[in-house]
Image (tube, rainbow, N blue to C red):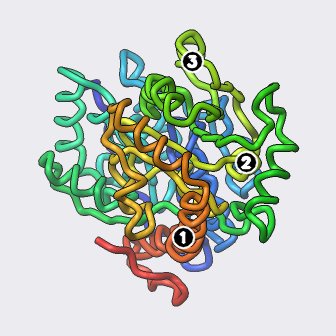
Amino acid sequence: MPTQPSSPTPSPSSPPGRPPAVLHLVQPVDGGVARVVVDLVRAQSAAGLRTVVGCPRGGQLADAARAAGAEVLTWRAGRAPGPGLAAEVLGARRLVDRVRPDILHAHSAKAGLAGRLAVRGAVPTVFQPHAWSFDAVGGATAALALRWERFGARWADRVLCVSEAERRTGESEGIAARWAVIRNGVDLDHFRPGGPDPARDKARARAELPLPAGFAGDGPLAVCVGRLCQQKGQDILLRAWPELLGAVPGARLALVGDGPDTERLRRTAPPGVHFAGPASDIRPWLRAADLVVLPSRWEGMALAPLEAMACGRPVLVSDVSGARESLPPGQGRLCLVEPEDPTALAKALGRLLAEPRLLAELGEQAQRHARMDFDVRRTTDAVTGLYHELLGRPRPLNQERISR
């Protein structure tokens, strides 16, 4: 463990008349973590809190957070732990001294590590794993990550999980934390069907997308949205695809996103797969899909399936943390597969893509479920309510209690 700077002077709770200040310390700066932080910043800024985001340059987060109402400060930090950790902790400490936040909210493993080492309980701290670090690695690295999470929990006033499954995993691994569970949500005004007729909605979306020759027809289209990396499991999907084509010969697959595995995946991709690259707006891809698939190796609660369901599309997901809690009741039998099992994934894809009526019914159920259970306003209200609880302030009347 790096040499630690002396503890910062505890900052008093903001005086009457000054809004509470929240420092969101964040790494990574793209993907679902960035979208969660931007949603929180937008709601908290609108509610009158002073929001500051400390994050590395690059990615989508800094500009989006600034547009959502946050002050953005640069925090130099890599994604993985390494020899630069001592400097990252010192950088986090400097941000805390500059901002003097009432709440430190550290997002993901690196920020959770550096932020908690920087303040060590001197500032009310919320740590949000966004999936456990020890699930992302193996061997000695995983053991070290777990050892840290067990130790570091003492410096979090709350460990905030996005699913009950994520919390249960932490408890089962011996992390003794003060837990809160607040499920992810999505902007239901943004993610919604493009029109009342699903068939026309799908046809219009396909006509507007830059699809290659052979992709613009009426055959079944599966779409996978996410960073092209080990976590999201696109390699498993590509291994399943040839077997799926034996059952549904006209099926096509679009991978939407980019990432460190892009070129490796391109080299191993079978016929019928389109690499769409990153999309500033994923809604047309979700609406064009017959089925949205995400074969992740680990998650907390993935956003892409929630966004797809809000757009009226059924999803097929691997049975990792948060997946069962995402799906409408009764869909687990059809829409969950074991992680890292290409054969099971191919069979599930074949059953679903061969049944257009079933897909339409599942999509209608998914839309109703998303609109009832995954409104981002519920999520952001609950997080702000948690801050008020930690600061000993009355919870605003319109905020729901979080589950524990």
CA separation, marks 3 and 1?
A: 32 Å
Asked if the residues shown at circle 3 and circle 1 are in contact, with their CB atoms under 8 angstroms apart, the answer is: no
Please tell me whether mark 2 sits on a helix, a strand or a loop.
helix
Residue 394 % position (x, y): 45, 85
228 left or right of 12?
right
- Circle number at residue 300: none
At 53% across and 13% down in the image, what residue appears?
A: 268
Image label count = 3
CA separation, marks 3 and 2?
A: 21 Å
| Residue placed under numbered mark 3 in the picture | 270
Characterize the local packing of mark 2: few (<14), some (14-19) or many (20 or more) Cα atoms within 10 angstroms: many
Characterize the local packing of mark 1: few (<14), some (14-19) or many (20 or more) Cα atoms within 10 angstroms: some
Please tell me whether mark 1 sits on a helix, a strand or a loop.
helix
At 69% across and 61% down in the image, what residue appears?
A: 191
Residue 364 % position (x, y): 60, 69
Tell me the amino acid under the disc marked 1: Gln
62 left or right of 365?
right
Specify the quadrant of the image occupied by residue 309: bottom right
Q: Which badge, 3 or 1, is on the more N-terminal residue?
A: 3
Q: Would residue 90 be seen by someone viewing this image from the given angle?
A: no
- Circle number at residue 365: 1
Q: Quadrant of the C terminus?
A: bottom left
Q: Which badge, 3 or 2, is on the more N-terminal residue?
A: 3
93 left or right of 289?
left
Report the residue that reaches farthest toward the top: 267
Q: Which badge, 2 or 1, is on the more N-terminal residue?
A: 2
Characterize the local packing of mark 3: few (<14), some (14-19) or many (20 or more) Cα atoms within 10 angstroms: some
Residue 172 % position (x, y): 14, 51
- Circle number at residue 288: 2
